[in-house]
Each structure stands twice: as structure tokens, then as C-alpha cells.
């Protein structure tokens, strides 16, 4: 653990009331939200991609949610995403975030993927860990955020500068602030090995399922009990605070509506046609048959499912009904995106579109897209 401070007078004092002794002790006053980022918050406000991004044509990216993990920096997940090299780590007391932001923006999720809509105003007591090569290794430089231009209009926010790995320092600093690490509590109650401790729950469960022969019944029982204890405390917190619970962002209406636009963008990038064919093996004829796909129909089905499952307090980041009309009246996916841009000023996430390689085979591309569409057609809130 990194301990020397250049300015130790600004260090936080441990508060015993912030400590969680077990997973059942998971309440807002003992919790912090942790966000890893490439960007510093301006005037103490974290902006969503939609708010922070605007291109030369005045268009913004579709995503309007900001993602956090509770009491730990976000771990690597099953999609292959990891945040180990981000230059900014933000720690914010959860009860302060609740008070500082509109309640309707506190959306929900799970302990390792919790999201808030639009923007997040950081409360007093928040800490921003950022990389600085000017700070000696193993040393933390702590300064008042008001002393730098980006945060001159804030109060009670500290900046911790380090030349060490920001994610590691962020995790260490959670404990310096007097809070308990959720990943450590979970690992202790579940008796996890080191290799399983730093990953998200879905990825860990997948690995355990694949390697279940390596674990005895006592090991499995401890993991099940830890999952049950965490879920019970999470349900209680959700009821107390009033947010929704989702298995993950991809299964929430927010993630699904974003993916819908991304999928149209990927299809436009690939062949810009609603109608395609995929080669599939027919067990009866023992030959490959061409199967027709109507993506316009599939996308409309996903929209109807999302709309049907929206809760009364849920509002998406764009008018999905209008986008449905765009799809219905457009000859090509690109045409639908152009209407979306003109009418709502938004575009797909560039990251997903750029992941499509030009040499991807038709079957490989359509198999992946169809699998995702099947998932998003069935997904619903937990």
C-alpha cells in the first residue's frame, strides 16, 4: 500500500462508522461510488458521453449514463473491458451523491455496474485520483481541488496525484478514507482465491461454472452464501434509496436502447442493408441453406420490447418511438441514422462501430449480431 504523503495535513481521517464488517452491512452511509475515466470532471461535475461529446456537425454520442462500482474500482468484465490503465479515478460518498443530484437521475444497476443519468455533481468529501509523472513513485500528493482551474468552483474535494497505477491507488485510497472494500469483503466471505478476487461477478461465475470440478461443495456453498448476502443487502439498499436493479447495463432499457442505435450503425457500416442472408447447416438436408434475415423487423421488435418493459419512472436518453419511425420509413440503416441525427442530434458510439473489421466474414458478423439481438429481445429488468 502507498502511504507517504507530500501534504499529509490534507489526508482523510478514518471514520469507524464507514466500516462494513460483512456484506449484510452494505448501506449508503458506508458506501462510496468509484468511477474510472480518461477525463477530469469540470467544476466537480462528471458528464455522460452524450453531454461531453459533440462533433463538428453538432452530433453527440448516444450514451447518457455514467457508470460506477461500489466500494472498489470497476473490475475487468466478461466483455473484455478493463480499466487498469485509466488516468483518473473518482471516489464519491454515495449518500452525498444522492443529496447532490436529482433523484430521477439515480437509475440503478448492480454493485459493480451502477449508473446515473445525464451528469453527476460530486459532493464534498469526494476524492479525484489522477496520474502525474511529476510525483515520485510511492508518494501521494494531496491538494485542494479549488487550486486548479478545472475545479476552482468546487468545495471540499481533494485531488490525489500519483505516478503509480491509478486504479491500484484508487482502491487503496478507499480504505484511507475509512471505507471497506467491497471486493475484499466478498473475497473473504466467499473464500475466493486471488485469481478470482479482481473480476466482476458475471465473469467470476462463468469461470467457476467452467471449472466447477476444481471446487468442493464447501467452497461452492461459501460462494452461494456470499452472493445471497450481497444480494439481500443490495435489495434493501435499492428499496431504501429507490433505484432499480438490473443484472447489468446491457439488460437495462438504457443499455438496450443504446445498443439498438449501435446495431443499426454497425449494420450500416457493414453492408447498409436491412435484408441479409446467413448460411446455416440444415440437419435434414445435410447441406448449408441460406436463411433470409429482415433486420428492420428485428429492430422494431426490440424497440417494442424495450418500450413494453419500461417502468413508470424510466425515461430513455432519446425518443425511441421516433427512432422506430425512422427505421420503418428508411430504405437503409444509414438513412435511419441520418434521420436520427437530424431530428435528435445523436449518433452511435464510435467505439462499437470501429470494432467491425472489414475482413469479417458475413456469417461471423451476422451470427454475432443475431445473438445480440436475441439477447436484447429477451432482456428485462431484474
Image: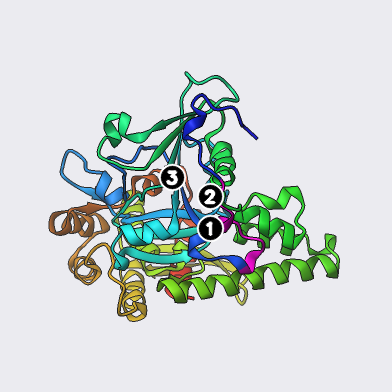
SS of the residue at dot 2?
Answer: loop
**Which disc, if any, is residue 355?**
3
Residue 74 image label: 2
Residue 358 sits in quarter: top left
- Where are the magenta residues, as a range? 14-24
Numbered marks: total: 3
Q: How busy is the neighbourhood of tag 2: few (under 14 within 10 Å), some, or many (20 plus)? A: many
Quarter containing the N terminus: top right
Residue 336 falls in which quadrant of the image?
bottom left
Do the CB atoms of the residues marked 2 and 3 lie less than 8 Å apart? no
What is the x, y in percent for residue 370? 46, 65
Which structural element holds mark 3?
loop
Q: Are marks 1 and 2 in contact (CB under 8 Å)?
A: yes
Tell me the CA gap for discs 1 and 3: 25 Å
Residue at 34% of width from left, 78% of height from top?
Answer: 311
Q: Position of residue 351 (x, y in %)?
A: 39, 45
Q: Residue at x 59, y 46 (%)?
A: 175
State which tag comes first along the sequence, 1 or 3: 1
Q: Which residue is mark 1?
A: 112
64 in relation to 324, above or below: above
Front-most of 219 and 16?
16
Amino acid at each position: 500500500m502507498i502511504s507517504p504523503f507530500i501534504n499529509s495535513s490534507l489526508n482523510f481521517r478514518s471514520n469507524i462508522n464507514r466500516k462494513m464488517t460483512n456484506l449484510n452491512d452494505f448501506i449508503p452511509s458506508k458506501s462510496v461510488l468509484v468511477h474510472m475515466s480518461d477525463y477530469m470532471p469540470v467544476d466537480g461535475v462528471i458528464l455522460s458521453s452524450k453531454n461531453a461529446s459533440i462533433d463538428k456537425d453538432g452530433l453527440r454520442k448516444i450514451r447518457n449514463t455514467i457508470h460506477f462500482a461500489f466500494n472498489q474500482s470497476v473490475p475487468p468484465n466478461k466483455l473484455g473491458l478493463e480499466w487498469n490503465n485509466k488516468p483518473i479515478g473518482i471516489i464519491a460518498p454515495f449518500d452525498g451523491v444522492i443529496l447532490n443530484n436529482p433523484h430521477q437521475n439515480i437509475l440503478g444497476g448492480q454493485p459493480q455496474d451502477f449508473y446515473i443519468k445525464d451528469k453527476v455533481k460530486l459532493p464534498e468529501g469526494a476524492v479525484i485520483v489522477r496520474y502525474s509523472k511529476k510525483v515520485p513513485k510511492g508518494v501521494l500528493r494531496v491538494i485542494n481541488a479549488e487550486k486548479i482551474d478545472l475545479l476552482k468552483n468546487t468545495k471540499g474535494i481533494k485531488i490525489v496525484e500519483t505516478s503509480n497505477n491509478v486504479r491500484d491507488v484508487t482502491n487503496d485510497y478507499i480504505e484511507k478514507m475509512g471505507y471497506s472494500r467491497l471486493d475484499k469483503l466478498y473475497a473473504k466471505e466467499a473464500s475466493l482465491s486471488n485469481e478470482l478476487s479482481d473480476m466482476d461477478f458475471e465473469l467470476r461465475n462463468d469461470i467457476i461454472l467452467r471449472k466447477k470440478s476444481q471446487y468442493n461443495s464447501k467452497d461452492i456453498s461459501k460462494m452461494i452464501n456470499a452472493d445471497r448476502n450481497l444480494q439481500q443487502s443490495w435489495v434493501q439498499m435499492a428499496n431504501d434509496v429507490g433505484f432499480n436493479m438490473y443484472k447489468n447495463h446491457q439488460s437495462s432499457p438504457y443499455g438496450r436502447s443504446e445498443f439498438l442505435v449501435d446495431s443499426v450503425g454497425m449494420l450500416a457500416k457493414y453492408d447498409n442493408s436491412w435484408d441479409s442472408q446467413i448460411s446455416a447447416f440444415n440437419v435434414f438436408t445435410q447441406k448449408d441453406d441460406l436463411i433470409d434475415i429482415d433486420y428492420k423487423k428485428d429492430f422494431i421488435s426490440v424497440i417494442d420490447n424495450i418500450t413494453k418493459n419500461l417502468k413508470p419512472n424510466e425515461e430513455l436518453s432519446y425518443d425511441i418511438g421516433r427512432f422506430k419511425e425512422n427505421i420503418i420509413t428508411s430504405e437503409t440503416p444509414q438513412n435511419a441514422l441520418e434521420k436520427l441525427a437530424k431530428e435528435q442530434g445523436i449518433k452511435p458510439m464510435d467505439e462499437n462501430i470501429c470494432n467491425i473489421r472489414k475482413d469479417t466474414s458475413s456469417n461471423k458478423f451476422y451470427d454475432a449480431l443475431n445473438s445480440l439481438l436475441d439477447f436484447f429481445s429477451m432482456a428485462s429488468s431484474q
